[in-house]
Amino acid sequence: MPLSTTNDTTVAQQHWMGNFALFMMIAGALIFLGTTDDVLQNAYLNRSMIVTLLLVIGITTFIISRSHIASKYQSHLLSIMLLIVPIISINLLPYAAVTAWASCFLFLMIALISYNRIVMWYTIVVVLATNLFIMFNTTTTMVEIDSSDHVARLGMVTIGICIALIINHLHIRNLSQLHSLANQLDEAAKRDPQTELLNLRGLEDFFDDANRQDLLLVGIHLENYYELARYFGEDIQARVLFECIERLQSLLPPYLALVRIEGGTIGVVMEKPEGVSCHDEMELLSQKMSAPYQIDLHQIYVNLYIVIDDGDTLQKSWMKRVQQVNSALQESVQNDKKVMCIDQTWRCEQTLRVEAARALSLAEVNRDFYLVYQLQYDSNQQTFVGLEALVRWKTELSKANQPSVFIPIAEKSDLIIRLGEWIFEEGCKTRKRLIGLVPENFTVSVNVSPRQLTNESFMPFIERMLLKYSLKPQQIKIEITESQSLDFESQPILRALRRIKTLDFPVSLDDFGTGHASYHVLERLLPLRQLKIPKQFIEQIEESAKRQSILESIFQLTRSMNVECIVEGVETGEEVRIAKDIGIHLFQGYFFAKPVSLTDIILLLESKNKEAME
Ligand code: C2E
Ligand code: MG
Ligand code: MG
C-alpha cells in the first residue's frame, strides 16, 4: 500500500476516535442531565458543571481529531483528552467510582479497536494508576469495597491489558505485513513484468516532478518486433528484445532510466548532453544497434527507429511526452526516417492535428463541409474541359480547414466513408447542374481515398448515384492518390478497381511520382484515363533542366501508355509555355482558375458561353 494510503488509514482512525468521543460525551452528558441520584446532586461538582465538562471534552476531542496536527501528536492529545474523564472521576471517587473503573476499560477498548499504540499505552498507565489509587484510598473513601475486590479488579485489569496488548500486537503485525505486501505490489505495478524495466507509471513516479523539461526522452522502436514472434516464435522475440536492451545499456551514454513504452518500443531518459549533437550520437547508436542479432542459429536483423524529444516544450506530463514520441515514431516508420528530432514545428502540427481530430469528431458532414471547384483547361481546344471537386471544412480552427490537414485525420476513421459519399453525391449533383452549360464529355473529378475503395459499400453507392442523377460514368472522374497507404495488391482494392474498370469510370492517378506506383501498379489501373503530375514537378521548371527532363519523360510515358497527362499547380505563363513545348496540353492551376464556389463556376461558364456565341 503506498504511503498515502497508510496515512489515510491513520486519519480515518483519528476521525473515528473523535466521532466516538463526541458521541460518548454527549451520551454521558444526557445521562447526567436525567439522573435523580441524590449523591450526585450533592457532589462538589454539580450536574451542570459535569455536563459542561463532558461536552467540552467531547467537542475538543472531536476538533483535535479533525485538525491537521501531525498524527503522532494528535494521538497524544486525543489520549490526554479522553483520559481526563477517569482522572477527574478519581477526584469524584466517592460519587463516581463506577465511572473511574468503567471508563478505563472503555478507553482500553477504543485504543484496541483503533489500533493506536500511543492511545493504548496512555490507557494502560491510567487504568493501572486509577485502580492502584482506588486500592490505596479505599479507607478514606465512602465507597464500600471489600479488600479482596481490589486484588480481583487489579487481576481483571491486568488480564484485560494483556489481551488488549496481544490483540493489538497481532493486529499491528498483520497490518504492517499487509502494508509491505501492498508496497511490493505498488513497486511491481511500476515495472514491466517481462523486462523489469520501468513502465509508464513507473516513469511518472520516478521523475515525480512531471515538468522535467531539462531531460531528454529518446524513443527507440524495433519495427519488426511483432513479426519476430510470427516468424520465429515468442521465445526468440523475447530474446531479441533482451539482447537489444543489453546492447542499448552498453552503447548508450550515461542515462537516468530505461522505460518499456510498449511492445518493441523502449524509452530512455537522460540529461541533455552539452556541446554534442544528440542527433549524430543517435545515428551512430542506430547503426550499432542494427547489427544483426545472433540467436541460436538465426541471424536476426532489426529495423530500428529513434525519436529524440528534447523537452523544449510546454508539455506538462511524461505521459503526454511519451504519446508524442510514439506518434513521431509512427511517422518516422511511415517515412522511413531512422533518426528524427521532435522540433517546435512538429509539435505545433501535432497539436493542430489533435485539435482537428477532436473537432472533426463533432463535425456533421451535411452541415460542416462544402465543396469548391477548380476548372481544368485544355490548351489544344482552348477551353475548360472539366473541374475538380475540392472539399473544405467550416471550422473555427483556421489552420485546419485545408484538406491536407483534415483529410489524413478523417482517413484514420470511418468519417472518410461518410464524407467521401457526401462529396461524391455533391459531385454528381454538380455535374447534373452543369448539363446544358458544358459539353457532354465535360468531367467532374472527385478525389477518392484508399479507405473508401476498400469499403464494401463504396462501389454499390457510386452505381446508385449514377442512376439517381442520370449520369454516365464517363462524366465523373475518380481521382486516386498515389499514396503509400494505397496497397494496390490488396484484394478489396483490386476488386474495387476491377469494378471501376467494368463500369468504365475514367480513373486519374493523382500526384503521380510522389508515392510508389510502379509499372505493375499502372498495369493494374489500366485502362487508366489520366496521370496527374503534381505541382512540385512544374514549379520553377524554367530554372531546372532536371525537372524539365523528368516532366518530359513522364509525358513520354503517358503517350506510350495512351493516357492523358495533366499538370496541376501551374501558376505562371512560363511554366505553361515549357509544358506546352514538351507536348502537354491539359492544365489545372491558379494560372487558369483558382478553386471557387459552384455559383462562381456557373457564372464563369455562362459568360464564356455568351462570349462564344457573340
Ligand atoms: P489534389 O487532389 O492533388 O488537389 C490539388 C491541390 O492543389 C488542391 O489543394 C488545389 O487547391 C491545389 N492547387 C491547385 N492549383 C494550384 C496552384 O496553382 N498553386 C497552388 N499552390 N496550389 C494549387 P487542396 O484543395 O488544398 O487539396 C489538397 C489535397 O487534399 C488534394 O490534393 C487531395 O489529395 C485532398 N483532397 C482535397 N479535396 C478532397 C476530397 O474531396 N476528397 C479527398 N479524399 N481528398 C481531397
Ligand atoms: Mg486531386
Ligand atoms: Mg494532386
Image (tube, helix red, strand yellow):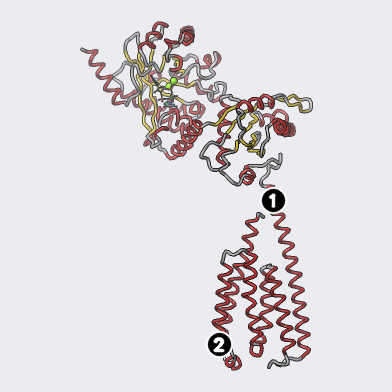
Q: Which mark is residue 47?
A: 2
Question: Vertically, is 208 above or below 238?
Answer: below
Q: Are marks 2 and 1 in contact (CB under 8 Å)?
A: no
Which is nearer the eye, 590 or 318? 318
Q: Position of residue 142 (x, y in %)?
A: 68, 93
Q: How many marks?
A: 2
Foreground: 339 or 134? Answer: 134
Mark 2 to mark 1 CA distance (whole Å): 56 Å
| Image location of residue 190, percent across then percent down | 66, 46
Write down the quadrant of residue 25 in the picture.
Answer: bottom right
Kind of residue at disc 2: Arg
The answer to which of marks 2 and 1 sits earlier in the sequence is 2
Where is residue 105 shown, x and y percent of the image?
69, 78
In which quadrant will I find the C terminus? top left
- The quarter of the image that holds ligand 3 is top left
Q: Is residue 82 above or below residue 463?
A: below
Question: Residue 445 falls in which quadrant of the image?
Answer: top left
Residue topped by disc 1: 185
Residue at figure coordinates x 71%, y 92% from the top left: 140
For the point 41% across and 32% down, the residue is: 399
Q: Residue 216: image x %, image y %?
A: 60, 36
Front residue of this view, candidates 573 and 434: 573
Q: Is residue 441 left or right of residue 296?
A: left
Position of 206 relative to 9 (above/below): above
